[in-house]
Image: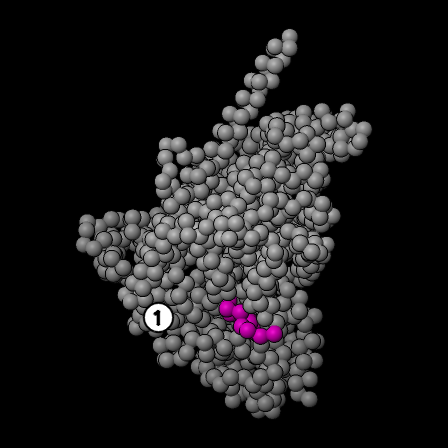
Amino acid sequence: MKRLWLAIMALLAAALCSPPLAAQDLLPPAPYAYKQIADPALEAKAQTLMLTLRCLKCQSQSIADSDAPMAGDMRHQVRTRIAAGEDPEAIRVWLIERYGDYVSYTPQLKPITWPLFAAPLIILVLAALLLRGRFRRSKAAA
Amino acid sequence: MIAELGLAMLWIAAALAALQLVAGCLALTPKGGLFMGLVRPVAIAQGVLVAGAFAALIWLFLSTDLSVKLVAGNSHAAKPWIFKLAATWGNHEGSMLMWVTIMSIGGGVVALVEKRLREETLVATLAGQAFVSLGFYAFLLLASNPFQRLPEPAAEGQGLNPLLQDIGLAFHPPTLYVGYVGLSIAFSFAIGALVTRDVGPAFARAMRPWVLGAWIFLTLGITAGSYWAYYTLGWGGWWFWDPVENASLMPWLAATALLHSCSVLASRGALKAWTVMLGVVAFSMSMVGTFLVRSGILTSVHAFAVDPTRGSFILALLAIYIGGALTLFALRANTVTEGARFSFVSREASLVFNNVMLCGILGIVLIGTLYPLLTEAMGVKVSVGPPYFNPVSAFFAIPMFLIMAVGPLLRWRDDKAARITWAVAVPAFLAAAALLGIVIFAPAVSVLSALGLALAPALALASLMPLRGRNLRRTPLPIYGGVLAHLGIAVALFGMASESAFSTEKLAAMNPGDVQQVGPYAITLKGIDPVAGPNWTALEATLAASYEGAAPIILRPQARTFSNPPGNRTESALSTRWNGQLYLVLGEEAADGRWQMRLWWKPFAPLIWYGGVLIALGGLLALVGRVARDVKRLVATDKIAFRRTAQGR
Amino acid sequence: MSAQAPGKPGPKKPGLALWLPLMLFAGFVVLVIYGLSRNANTDVVSAFIGKPLPAFDLPPASDDRPGLATADFTKGKPRLLNVFASWCVPCAVEAPQLAALAAKGVEIDGVAIRDRKQDLAQFLAQNGNPFARIGRDDLSQVQLAIGSSGVPETFVIDGRGVIRYQHIGDIRPEDVPIILRKLAEAGA
């Protein structure tokens, strides 16, 4: 069964995030799944947040890029809360409380992720160490 | 018969590869002179045989020979020939045969034309190439035979998944693939040079055209893949920092760094060990990328031919080759003499900084891609996405862009910063003015987009500066190539920044007759009709799009339903203008009978891909220039040799 | 063979730096061997286990069962909360196991995700109705609030309304004893 699933996945090079046809619900999408907030500033806020939240039913997509019904329900949730004046980061925290860090494409700064944030600096330090004393003094400057 | 012939050719080629490896190793022993002459002809014969095997597989697919398991499983008699051809490599076995084919033809061509290297180094290179291909021959012949027959011919082929029946498949995978595998030649050169401790300008010159060629294909492959995803996925995104995308970006970054360090080594004899290291890393990244994609170890939207068992096989090959090469490097790099030194303000120094920044991006892409796996091993699931990759790669990319503007103007070895003040001041002023303009007139634009928008025009201007004061008709092609490639970076950067800063999105539920405004376009829904294609049915929206009141153009996005195998796919409708792209998607029918439409206006978005094409064109110019010069030199030396023998008689 | 380990020998002691790429590569190999050997488990586990159910009050999803609210879970006895839908095939597969649990006296409440009344009625008629109450969650709001990422999922809720255990996917016959044990633990 697992092999079969892998075989199917193999064929979906540009697979859309659509569950099998047999398991499609018949309810219309949530009101704010495909509807923007009237205020463009709030909609922009919601859009920025939605692009950084991971769709839980998909292979690797944000909820802003997915047609999965659950992603639609999450968009509805995000848009209604932002329209009600909630802070985007508060919504992210709310979701992380329920699904763990997995749900957020923005890694949160905590002990387990600090190497991720230190990586650029470590790379720079390594490069500096390797380049130390490599240059000869310029004749032109002298 | 053709299938058996192909398989036979493949086995003989594998045997020749083994012979090539043994003869190469023996030739490098003190008394091995006897074997020296054997390696080149064997490499050429190996290339010819594998090309024959690949041609046989293509023939089987084009003629739809259903007695062959691979053809029956992946093709269908009633398909256009282009998709039959694409089906040859649209599967695991065929793509592995393609891998070996490119590798061995590359080796054969090296054996045929390369005359600059010391013969020992060349023989070591070809032995290394044979060593690498042997592993892939084993994989192909023992675990993924493309020529396997069915006990009974199938009545009809199973066809290629409709989702893959797109012109994108005919173009994107093979292009990327040629790039991936082309880097194996650079890898072999690096091995050869390490074995004989012969790392010098001749090595860099011999390797450079191969790196350039592979890099051009990688650039085109990534550009095509990004555009394919952009119009197929139907949400207007063009880069998601998905593991599979990152897997294609990493070899590109390494190859770009290698290309630049090669030119330092070729011109100045410096950065020896570093260039060899990059030669190893570039192909390693290709193999790591292939492994990440095929093993399914990381989840991706673009999953392709996923199979963990094959993943283990690829991992074993990867461990042998990369591990072996890195061990050889650690043992030998010490004995590689240090190259010519240079001052802090010099062309070399700028290229070193460029390399550091490129490798910095490579490092964080690799770390960011693997990090979720690392934390999972510690029991925590995390996701690393655009909010990490965008700023962190910009942290390296922005200094790199600044150096890119200055570097090509500097002289080799030692230069005075004062000499290029004006050539730098003009673009710098342009960037500052642009940044000020954005801050005043478009304060809502994010920091990264603002920096991109401000830097891009300055970078475009700076990229042309190396042509200043030159006789344009006498300027060598490689200089034009560099100018064009850097210009392409600026163009793509502008497209990316503009797309992210100024895109407007409109989600609307529309009745026929309704009008929606998105950006400068007024969009009228004319109607929704069912249409049928060869293996799908679809709902098709007819929309009239009018640009600022001009005569409307008709666009027809579709929502397609495929029957066998079942699946849905949106077909977005795009309209490209010089200043942007209109992107329309048909969604589902809402409860009240209106139709969900997704409309985007993306100012200057096509520049992202035009930029990619420009970069590849720049590479092509440089390649043509270099190869033409090499050919001229080759012909000249041959003439001299011919005259000498003629006179000798 | 990460890129931050360039192979350029430092001027003083190049030895160690040259082995760095190999060591990093070895780390990579170890990591991916772990990755290949792990069960390809794409389940997203709720981070809400051990926390009290959030406040909700769902309308009834079917005509013969009442709706579902948080207050229904704070009556002193552990209960199962089954997140399901009529359009979900594994939900039909797990129906006999739910029936077996109900037969053992386990009280089960359902949350129907994105479901229509007529579809649900047909589903219950076909697969049996082990539920005491069924709440109707058309916007997946309760599902999101308890950290459930798909259907079916089954939660063990103790008598004070605290989530004790989450079972992801359909309940197989071999899972029934585990769930009974978790219920007993939650009741203790």
Q: Nearer the viewer, residue A43 or B608?
A: B608
Q: Position of residue B443 (x, y in %)?
A: 32, 68
Q: Is residue C38 depicted above or below B636 in this figure?
A: below
Name the magenta segment's main secondary structure: loop
In which quarter of the view is residue B109 placed? Answer: top right
Q: Where is residue B23? Give x, y as percent.
A: 75, 30
**In this rendering, position of residue C55 left or right of residue B500:** right
Q: Amino acid at mark 1?
A: Glu
User: On screen, B374 above or below B425?
Assistant: below
Kindly tell me whether residue B371 is visible in this rendering: yes
In percent of width and height, residue B376 lies at 63, 66
Pointer 1 residue: A43
Q: Residue at x 66, y 82 (%)?
A: C183
Q: Quadrant of the C terminus of chain B?
A: top right
Name the residue nearer the viewer: B337 or B158: B337
Q: Splitting the image into 4 quarters, where does residue A64 fall? A: bottom left
Q: Is residue A110 magenta?
A: yes
Magenta range is A100-111
**Residue that lies at the very extreme toward the bottom in this rendered image:** C76
Residue at 40% across, 50% down: B420
The answer to which of B313 and B212 lies nearer the viewer is B212
